[in-house]
Amino acid sequence: MIILGIETSCDETSAAIIKANKKTGRVKLLSNIIASSLTLHAKTGGIIPEVAAREQVKFIIPVIKKALEVLKDPKREIDAIAITVGPGLIGSLLVGVETAKTISYVWKKPIIPINHLFGHIYANFVSEINNSAVPEFPAIALIVSGGHTDLVLLKNHKDTLWLGGTRDDAAGEAFDKTGRLLNLPYPGGLEIEKMAKGIKQDLYNFPRPLIDSNDFDFSFSGLKTAVLREVQKTGKIDGRIIKNISYSLQEAIFDVLINKTLKAAAKYNAKSILLGGGVAANQTLRKRFEFEIRNLKLEIPFFVPEKWLCTDNAGMIAAAGFYNYEEIPWNKITANPELYFD
Ligand code: KG4
Ligand code: ZN
């Protein structure tokens, strides 16, 4: 089965082709084209929705055209179109959704609507090689992106349970806002990772919000205030201070993320732990997860997508489409910026 995936929920414009084997249940990525307006947003220190959507209107057709190049006869070979319908920025979502509907109508192909958050989970089911391992159920998934921090239990592909999420800022948002405070370019998460390199001591020991709470909720908005207080106390901040703050901030956020995820994995007897979303591209977070799982002798396989599949891309959306195949007529598909977990 061949699926065309399309993703335009935030500032990326992406189209991908996957080849899925119904017998083996494996998904192979044939193409995954991503165009980003990140450099424009870096100039403004964040995403301006109108700017993002206008860029996506320009990118969408060339990006789809490029993704289709791996097929000889796309119109004949494609079996379905998987499209991100939410959550995200409405202007951005509409670019992808309306394009997918048009292709569906003209080429008479079924559409599979995909929740972007599930897409991040399914980045763990994408492989470029056929024999890589596929996560087993029940699985605990942690989604850490710019807009979301969520813990989800997957009993199987169809039966999922949202366990908890952030009460205020998402982990990526905490990095982005603190990055702005420290005069670092957007996106803050990536810059903070670079700044934290080489530091080994947690000098600032920022709070670990809700780390011992009896639920699976998160709260990261207090961290930017804690950083602001340090910045105000110090007066003029130099490179050394920024590096130390970056390291301490990562440690605080990652301690909470890892602690709660492993608690959920133990509670639900997880057979795999999945990480996804832009923050999952962070090397320290990836290494610390592996270390803590080994340290606690949990023996639960840990999955994290390749770095380029952690941030928004259509490959993960196409994969989610295969494992959650549900055809919806094109005229019933609508973008839903507020879409969440059921
Ligand atoms: O998943 P994503 O591409 O878009 C959303 O769906 O939000 O995630 C973007 C977020 C941004 O907040 C960015 O700062 C963060 O991911 N991010 C990182 C890293 N790369 C991107 N955070 C920490 N370390 C990184 N290397
Ligand atoms: Zn995302």
Image (cartoon, grey):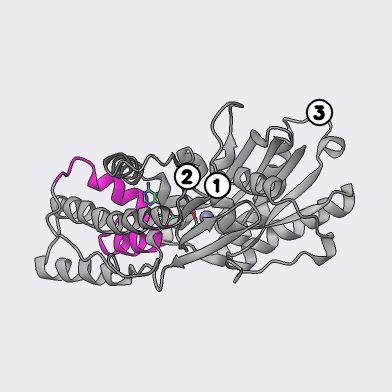
- Report the span colored magenta: 172-200
Point out residue 300 in the picture as x, y percentages from the top left corner: 41, 42
Q: Which residue is mark 3?
A: 72
Secondary structure under tag 1 reads loop
Point out residue 129 in the picture as x, y percentages from the top left corner: 58, 26
Q: In the rendered view, does 40 fall on the left or right side of 50? A: left
Mark closest to the chain's N terminus, 1 or 2:
1
Q: CA distance from mark 2 to mark 3?
A: 37 Å
**Closer-to-camera residue (34/164):** 164
Q: CA distance from mark 3 to mark 1?
A: 36 Å
Mark closest to the chain's N terminus, 2 or 3:
3
> 202 above or below 150?
above
Choose top left, top right, bottom left or bottom right for residue 307.
top left
- Residue 22 seen anywhere in this rendered image of the structure: yes
- What's the mark number on residue 272? 2
Point out residue 154 in the picture as x, y percentages from the top left corner: 55, 54
Q: Quadrant of the N terminus?
A: top right
What amino acid is found at the position of numbered circle 2 in the picture? Ser
Q: CA distance from mark 1 to mark 2?
A: 7 Å
Q: In the rendered view, does 130 fall on the left or right side of 147? A: right
Q: Badges 1 and 2: C-beta atoms under 8 Å apart?
A: yes
What amino acid is found at the position of numbered circle 1 in the picture? Phe
Q: Nearer the viewer, mark 2 or mark 3?
A: 2
Choose top left, top right, bottom left or bottom right for residue 23.
top right
Q: Quadrant of the C terminus?
A: bottom right
Point out residue 178 in the picture as x, y percentages from the top left corner: 29, 63
- Residue 66 seen anywhere in this rendered image of the structure: no
Q: Which residue is mark 1?
A: 137
Choose top left, top right, bottom left or bottom right for residue 287.
top left
Task: Assess whether residue 128 is covered by the magenta stretch.
Answer: no
- What's the mark number on residue 45? none
